[in-house]
Image (cartoon, rainbow, N blue to C red):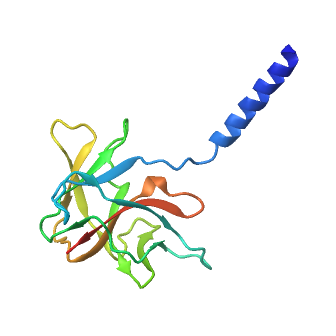
Amino acid sequence: MKQKIAGLVLIAFVCLLTLSSFKHYYLNYQVIGCGINAAGATGELLEQATATLPKGKGKSATSTYSFQGTRALTQRFKIGDQCLEVVASTGQSNPTGIVSLFKLTVGKTNRSFSITEDGTTASGEISFQLTPVDGSPGHFKVFLGPGATLFPGEYVFADRSTSTTDGKINVWAFGID
């Protein structure tokens, strides 16, 4: 009987190690709107989605991610009224260089953005700085970089730390009217 229990414990341990070697899909960072959105609310999470990298042919220095859906984004801000914060999970550091902001290319059936693999700025990537919010550990206010402006359209924050080998990445989308 003890041998059977020891065998089951060994099998359970091996299964645990095997399953834990796969990359788990969890959020390291979240993005919230601290400005008043079109619905009159503040402090809500931006619309969360998973963007997918289509299987392509050949090598490219740019990866174009897309996510499906033609419905309007629920988190919308009036131009100039947007206020955004990146919130780090417990133990996460300042996400500068991990979370990126992109203007979306919107088609009839999907939305897309491109990330470069070589560290250069991609077309549609918008520079910003993160400044810690006083008294709120893990909260960082988003300030657009020099010359950067959000025009009417749709945008996405991409958490590069969640990129998986099967071409998925966590994003938070919002619109500017």
Instruction: Give the residue at the far front of this rendering.
Output: 39
Residue 34 image position (x, y, % from top left): 19, 53
Residue 11 image position (x, y, % from top left): 78, 31
Which residue corresponds to the image point at 37% horizontal and 49% vertical from the top-left? 29
Quadrant of residue 157 within the rendered picture = bottom left
Q: Quadrant of the C terminus?
A: bottom left
Q: Is residue 136 above or below residue 40?
A: above
Q: Decide which of 71, 10 is in the foreground and name it.
A: 71
Instruction: Give the residue at the far top of this rendering.
Output: 2
Quadrant of residue 92 within the rendered picture = top left
Residue 99 image position (x, y, % from top left): 35, 56
Q: Quadrant of the N terminus?
A: top right
Q: Decide which of 92, 89 is in the foreground and name it.
A: 89
Q: Is residue 121 above or below residue 8?
A: below
Count of residue discs: 0
Q: Is residue 27 left or right of residue 81?
A: right
Which residue corresponds to the image point at 37% horizontal and 79% vertical from the top-left? 105
Q: Is residue 62 above or below residue 143?
A: below
Residue 9 image position (x, y, % from top left): 76, 24
Instruction: Give the residue at the far bottom of this rendering.
Output: 108
Q: Is residue 65 left or right of residue 174?
A: right
Instruction: Give the residue at the far left of this rendering.
Output: 80
Q: Is residue 70 above or below residue 14?
A: below
Q: Decide which of 107, 132 is in the foreground and name it.
A: 107
Which residue corresponds to the image point at 33% horizontal and 74% vertical from the top-left? 72
Which residue corresponds to the image point at 34% horizontal and 41% vertical from the top-left? 93
Q: Is residue 106 left or right of residue 37?
A: right
